[in-house]
Image: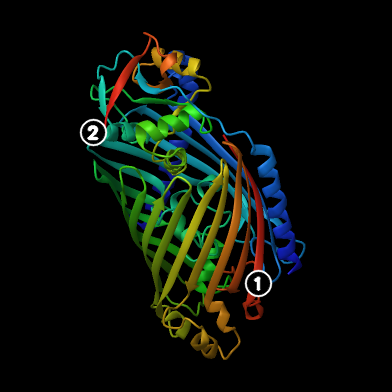
Amino acid sequence: MSNSRFSTIAFFLGSSALSLIFLARSVLAEELPKLQNLDLFKLNGFLSQGYIKTNKNNFFGHSNDSGSLDFREIGLTASLRPSPKLQLSGQLLHRRAGEGSNGGIHIDFGFLDYNFANTPAAEIGIRLGRMKNPFGFYNDTRDVPFTRPSILLPQSIYFDRTRNLALASDGIQVYGESRADWGNITVQFGAAFPQVDGRDTEISVLRSLQRRGDLKTKLSYIGRILYEQADGKLRLAISGAQANVGYSPGYNDILLNGSFRFSPLILSAQYNAERWSITSEYALRHLSWKDFGNDAAFQQSFTGESFYLQGVYRFYPNWEAVLRYDLLFTNRKDRSGKKFAASTGYLYPAHNQYAKDLTIGLRWNITPAIMLSTEYHRINGTAWLSPLDNPDMSHTGKNWNLFAVQASYRF
Amino acid sequence: MGFLGYWFRGIFFLTLLVTFSFAGNAQSFNDSVEVITHPGINSNYLSKNLLRSIFGMRLRAWQNGLPVRVFVLPDDAPLHSVFTKQKLNLFPYQLRSAWDRMVYSGTGQAPFVVHTEEEMRARIASTPGAIGYLSGSMINDSVQVVHIDE
């Protein structure tokens, strides 16, 4: 079966899951008013509007001028559980975040979950369709403001610059959980086709939007093992993935039928006390380009490194403060970026290869459904800036600030 | 730097706002809290770990195959906080994060939210497979009290 065909099937499955959910809802409402009381169907949603202002560089729109209101997330999440063994889930997402996400409505996920066994001691099941990639602590719910510790997730790991490749994929996932007095272990493993149709992926993999050919999704693998103490205080996770992307050259293309591979490994740890939580994640991200032709930029491979340490302090009922230090090195063998700058003949500055971000933020849960948050970043380096919002990456500001506010609502 | 100045002024103003709007708003809660189920659930004892799996929305069915239906009060209800801490040894924010992770990744469902203890009692008495909690003084024969093993 060809990749694109599989991808189409997965997409079809996802859409049918969504339409089935809505169809079943109306059937249930008419035919089985008694079951309504049991609410097999659940509908949730969220809506947010952000404002971002930077003193140099652009993030999520033209933030450098008068600030940018180009950051909006709207989601509709539905699930239907006709029996304890079977669940259909889907989420529609509209997201604007500068040039990288410029609107439209996407199927964020849509899948069928079959729970073979679920006992007090263990569960095991399988999922089929489009699923969020189980990746670190936050990727599965990265576009839901209420699930994030801050307005922007630590960019060293949860890139908004190239997000589509890591976001969700179409395929199959098996999962299992063991539950004991000493804690729960949850394992997820998936074989799926990642999404490669975004401009953000195109510019990251092909380094230009002017290529004649197209990216092709290829079979990829992802897995996460998560340990949680029974009282949830300590949470530890290890996630790994191998995302494969191919290239089909266009007419008279200088690039050949090459392939790109992104292989991240993430270690995650969190400790939760009543008033505070400490979270840290470390990632090694291996990237390699092969068989694209003679251009040196497309024959390389390197490993990037990411790390953050984050503290959340719940200092008053419904109020939270967050403090975080976030580090990104595009190439761990060239942390200063000097070799990179030299290799481009000093056309691009060394600081494009790293980013050190100190963030302080405040969050107010006005009601369980309404949240206001604000944060301030002092950043050294521009490694996670999007080239879509900053077309001239040779003239980025090295030391810069970012201020953000966001209002969010959910039901 | 003017930029930073505005931000700190904002924080200062918010801090004042918090201090005034929440001063003296700390609520105390003196009643006991008990786990209750629909009378059709014939187990009078549950282990603390099983109770965590149930309220963490991990266990989907009772042993006889009946779907588990979890009822809770809103996150900011004092009884919800007492129940979460005393019976589950968890903090309310931990439950909320766990539910949000499931709902917004499609891997689970959130519990049913009721707004008063009267509503909690009525829904649990009338829903097969239901589980929730009530303060001691609100319990009557329409629901079954479950004891939790430490």
**Tag 1: Cα neighbours inside 10 Å, few (<14), some, or many (≥20)?**
some
Residue at the outermost top position: B141
Residue at image position (58%, 36%) is A369
Classify the position of the N terminus of chain A by image quarter: bottom left
Query: In this figure, which colouring scheme has been used for the structure?
Result: rainbow
Q: Which amino acid type corresponds to the residue marked 1 in the rendered image?
A: Trp
Answer yes or no: is residue A190 visible: yes
Q: Secondary structure at mark 2?
A: loop
The residue tagged 1 is A400
Which numbered marker is on residue A379? Answer: none
Observer-nearest of B62 and A127 = B62
Secondary structure category for the residue under label 1: strand
Circle 2 chain? A
Compared with B37, A113 (above or below) is below
Q: Which mark is residue A119?
A: 2
Quarter of the figure that contains the C terminus of chain A: top right
Q: Residue at x 42, y 61 (%)?
A: A280
Left or right position of A72 against A164: right
Residue A213 seen in render? no
